[in-house]
């Protein structure tokens, strides 16, 4: 089918292009930034225990590795010296964090005065903190995705009868997405090693779930035993992958490639399905449109640029672009479940259906 091939080719190219989208940060590697941060911590975080300057961790450690802090005392100093708001205290901005944040902006201004490109810090653009949130635009758009999934899942439950084929499958998809967007909101609010791990891990669960939905949709007429074995295989694979991400240093490029590979397989699978059912299931256009538009939205990740107003970057725009696409997927599932139920009733039930 020419139309499907024309849609599939740009989708695959866009997905593969994302693998080359990571850039090394240079702001946190400058001596200016390190001198500023060390002086700030030495002056304002006096309760901390300094690590020697020749420490090999100097360029790669996080603020929590860099100082052995008395949490209560340092937090009290930060509140007084930096005039922290209730949101800053709620999201646990420590004295060392405040030093890193302040020195980040001093480094940005130093680059700007010299006409140099805006630098990244620890792999991220500099973002203006708002109400204690590190990336306020991404937080807002993650919440919008969360709310949209919640509303569409409720619509699905209203319009589809519980005895419809694939009824629970849609709930698995919905709950997986709700969980993923919750952790996306938390991670963009405060970037800790734990919140980063959970954000990346549960983001992959959404991608893997899309592949799982495809496989289970193709096998919905088969025995419960077969579907259970395949479900167990998916769950075992994801648990092992989660464990892999949790151990050792986080491999960003490998995680990106795994996401791309899984998403590509799911997209190709749906394109093949659309090709074979195009004459008897006209609603196939909804799932086709969903994946094509998702690929176009993902291309925003290729437009890596400093945040507009220090808040709105390409990643935030990607989160925003996915919001209007969510209803397409649920509308497809609603119509598909209704159609499958009618077919099941007309056939007097499936031979192997449980």
Image (cartoon, rainbow, N blue to C red):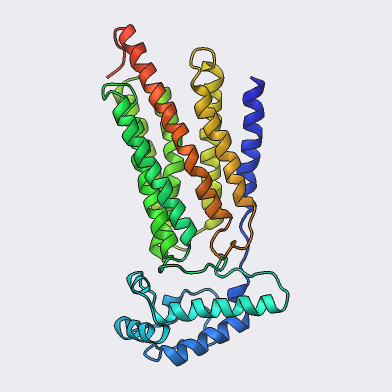
Task: Give the camera-side residue of 338 and 244.
Answer: 338
Q: Is residue 317 above or below residue 175?
A: below
Please state if 157 lies on the left or on the right of 115 as rendered.
left
Q: Where does residue 287 sit, x and y in percent of width and height?
A: 50, 29
Residue 241, position in %: x, y? 42, 49
Is residue 165 left or right of 289 when viewed as pictured?
left
**Residue drawn 57% across the image and 87% down it:** 35
Residue 186 in sight: yes
Where residue 315 appears, as percent x and y from the top left, is 55, 54
Q: Is residue 2 left or right of residue 151?
A: right
Residue 157: x %, y % from top left: 30, 30
Query: Camera-side residue: 65 or 348?
Result: 348
User: Where 47 falls versus 280 (above or below)?
Assistant: below
**Rendering quarter of residue 66:** bottom left
Q: Nearer the viewer, residue 56 or 195?
A: 195
Residue sitting at 62 percent across and 65 percent down? 24
Q: Is residue 52 visible?
A: no
Which of the 4 quarters of the picture holds residue 110? bottom right
Residue 157 relative to residue 300: left or right: left
Q: Quadrant of the N terminus?
A: top right
Q: Residue at x 51, y 45 (%)?
A: 259
Q: Quadrant of residue 307?
A: bottom right
């Amino acid at each position: 089918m020419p139309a499907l091939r024309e849609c599939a080719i740009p989708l695959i190219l866009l997905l593969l292009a994302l693998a080359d989208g990571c850039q090394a940060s240079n702001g946190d590697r400058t001596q200016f930034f390190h001198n500023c941060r060390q002086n700030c911590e030495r002056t304002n975080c006096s309760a901390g225990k300094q690590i020697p300057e020749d420490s090999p961790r100097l360029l790669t450690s996080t603020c929590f590795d860099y100082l052995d802090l008395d949490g209560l005392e340092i937090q009290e100093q930060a509140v007084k010296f930096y005039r922290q708001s209730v949101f800053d205290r709620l999201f646990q901005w420590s004295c060392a964090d405040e030093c890193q944040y302040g020195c980040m902006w001093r480094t940005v201004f130093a680059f700007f005065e010299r006409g140099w490109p805006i630098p990244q810090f620890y792999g991220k653009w500099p973002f203006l903190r708002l109400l204690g949130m590190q990336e306020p635009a991404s937080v807002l758009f993650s919440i919008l995705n969360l709310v949209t999934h919640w509303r569409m899942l409720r619509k699905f439950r209203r319009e589809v009868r519980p005895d419809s084929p694939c009824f629970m499958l849609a709930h698995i998809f919905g709950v997986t997405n709700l969980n993923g967007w919750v952790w996306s909101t938390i991670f963009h609010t405060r970037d800790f090693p734990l919140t980063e791990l959970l954000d990346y891990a549960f983001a992959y669960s959404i991608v893997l779930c899309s592949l799982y939905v495809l496989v289970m949709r193709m096998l919905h007429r088969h025995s419960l035993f077969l579907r259970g074995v395949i479900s167990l295989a998916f769950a075992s694979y994801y648990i092992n992958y989660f464990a892999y991400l949790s151990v050792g240093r986080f491999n960003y490029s490998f995680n990106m490639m795994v996401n791309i590979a899984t998403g590509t397989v799911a997209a190709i699978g749906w394109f093949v399905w659309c090709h074979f059912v195009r004459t008897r299931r006209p609603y196939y256009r909804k799932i086709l449109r969903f994946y094509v538009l998702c690929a176009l939205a993902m291309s925003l990740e290729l437009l890596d640029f400093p945040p507009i107003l220090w808040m709105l970057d390409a990643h935030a725009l990607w989160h925003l672009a996915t919001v209007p696409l969510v209803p397409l997927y649920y509308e497809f599932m609603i119509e598909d479940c209704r159609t499958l139920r009618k077919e099941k009733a007309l056939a007097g039930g499936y031979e192997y259906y449980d």
